Amino acid sequence: MAYTYDDQNIFAKILRKEIPNDTVLETEHSLAFRDIRPQAPLHVLVIPKGPYVTFDHFAQEASEAEIVDYVRAVGEVCRREGVAEDGWRLISNAGRDGVQEVPHLHVHVLAGRGLGRMLE
Ligand code: 5GP
């Protein structure tokens, strides 16, 4: 499928510093910041700086440097926030059925409490 990136989405505005964010980590190609409506004691969103809508879009069009940077940023967030030992959950909602609210690729990092089983 072909993706069209809407540069008016809220995360694009965060990347352009048009609206503030609580940054946890910034790397060459990625930004991690706290979710405005946290669903767990730790709720961080990790986004690539490039204009990608979903993981599929990112995997198709991002450079290897961007992909490596992004995966490392997610791991670094877990280490920096002290949850590497007790654990965490990654979620990436995509498209209509995934109920994606913001059309810029993001991974939710949730941690800091028992998160329960999602899948049986
Ligand atoms: P989605 O449903 O697209 O996977 O999740 C989007 C997430 O972005 C939600 O958890 C929501 O709370 C968060 N969010 C929406 N607007 C803002 C904002 O302006 N700042 C921050 N930090 N998070 C936001």
Image (cartoon, helix red, strand yellow):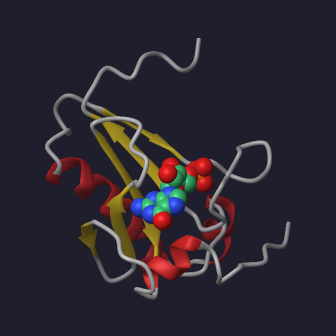
Image coordinates for residue 84, horizontal then vertical, percent = 20, 39
Please name the residue shown 71% across and 45% down the image. 99
Image coordinates for residue 106, horizontal then vertical, percent = 52, 59
- Going by the image, does 114 lie left or right of 58? left
- State whether residue 106 appears in this view: no
Vertical order, 67 against 34 (above or below): below
Please name the residue shown 40% across and 54% down the image. 35
Please name the residue shown 34% across and 35% down the image. 40
Vertical order, 117 against 85 (above or below): above
Quadrant showing the N terminus: bottom right
Image coordinates for residue 47, horizontal then vertical, percent = 46, 67
- Going by the image, does 47 lie left or right of 104? left
Vertical order, 1 against 5 (above or below): above
Q: Total number of numbered labels?
A: 0
Vertical order, 71 against 120 (above or below): below
Residue lying at the far top of the rendered structure: 120
Residue lying at the far right of the rendered structure: 1
- State whether residue 67 appears in this view: yes
Q: Nearer the viewer, residue 56 or 11?
A: 11
Quadrant showing the C terminus: top right
Q: Nearer the viewer, residue 30 or 22?
A: 22
- Going by the image, does 13 lie left or right of 89? right
Q: Nearer the viewer, residue 12 or 3?
A: 12
In the figure, residue 54 lies in which quadrant? bottom right
Image coordinates for residue 22, horizontal then vertical, percent = 28, 66
